Image (cartoon, rainbow, N blue to C red):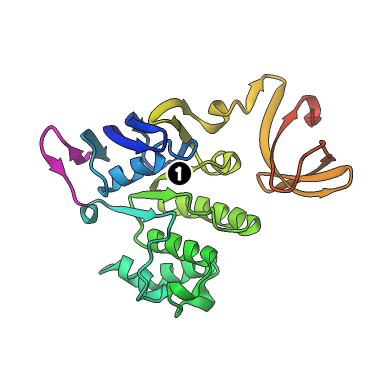
Amino acid sequence: MIRINICKKLNLADGVSQLVVDAELSLQKITALYGPSGAGKTSLLKIIAGLMQPEDGFIEVNGEVWLDTSRGINLPPQKRNIGFVFQDYALFPNMTVRQNLLYASRKNIDEQLIEHLLKLTGLVAFVNHKPATLSGGQKQRAALARALVRKPALLLMDEPLSALDNETRLLLQQELLQLHSEYKFSALLVSHDVAEVYHLADYMLSIDKGKILKTGKPAEVFGLIESEDQIRLFGQVVSVDGDWMTVIVDQRLFRLKCVTGLKVGDRVSLGFGDAGKIL
């Protein structure tokens, strides 16, 4: 079990707010933190990682107390078995891609795992490149590989796939699920992408202005299952051709009549009634 009970003052664009989170999360699951920018999602990840200190808090992971302000317990980041993928990559600029992964491995170097991660992230040709020579997407893939190479007990991901094109994003989502199935790590994923949360997460916390608004399975929180005879899913418009559009939903393509005003990249909601008829 992962137990989190924290309170932290946040200085937001629209004023001072309190980040208040009280949650118990299952181990070996992917939990999404979903909400708008400034909701407190990234701050919560930093507190869990030990990079930001709350005024009051308690964090316990699988029976090990990482933080207890009432008893003066606060394990440093290096004592918490975590992998962290930042929005800004946070790669070591003086190291190559391979050296970044080797440094993260430290004494437990697993060359087979390193090669597997380099292959699935498409970085085999860039192993000797330093971050300054990589594109934004390549940096994000390197950051993801570096976090996974430690086989973390808790993987913290702050929109790790946001810099990738749609095809690569979908591929890495599937690879993440495969890695999760193999290594059984617990993960917290920050995302504002409904389709990504629905595809990757077992459970989610919907957060806004520092407060938890709703918790549960993504289908429940997003209202994807609205009734016994209708299922509603979220997808993304990938092409528009005159009166027709193509929508991708969980790696499946649907060719539909276009709704006026929709363009490539827009998120759409599809309702499926009896016999799979799209409503």
Specify the farthest residue to the left: 71
Residue shown at the point (39%, 73%) measured from the top left = 111
- On screen, residue 75 versus residue 132, left or right, reads left
Residue shown at the point (64%, 55%) measured from the top left = 166
Residue numbers of the magenta segment: 63-76
If the image is split into quadrants, where does the C terminus sit?
A: top right
Specify the farthest residue to the right: 243
- Closest to the observer, 54 or 169: 54
Determine whether 78 is above or below 47 in the image.
below
Query: Which quarter of the picture shows residue 230?
Result: top right
- On screen, residue 195 versus residue 54, left or right, reads right
Q: Is residue 69 magenta?
A: yes
Residue shown at the point (41%, 38%) measured from the top left = 13
Specify the farthest residue to the front: 14
- Residue 140: percent from left, percent from top: 48, 61
Query: Which quarter of the picture shows residue 31?
Result: top left
Specify the farthest residue to the bottom: 128
- Closest to the observer, 60 or 258: 258
- Residue 35: percent from left, percent from top: 49, 35
- Residue 172: percent from left, percent from top: 55, 57
- Residue 211: percent from left, percent from top: 39, 28
Q: Is residue 239 magenta?
A: no
Secondary-structure class at tag 1: strand
Report if residue 1 is visible in the image: no
Determine whether 68 is above or below 145 in the image.
above
Identify the residue under disc 1.
190
Report if residue 196 is visible in the image: yes
If the image is split into quadrants, where does the N terminus sit?
A: top left
Count of numbered labels shown in the rendering: 1
Circle 1 residues within 10 Å: few <14, some 14–19, many ≥20: many
Give the amino acid at mark 1: Val
Residue shown at the point (44%, 80%) measured from the top left = 128
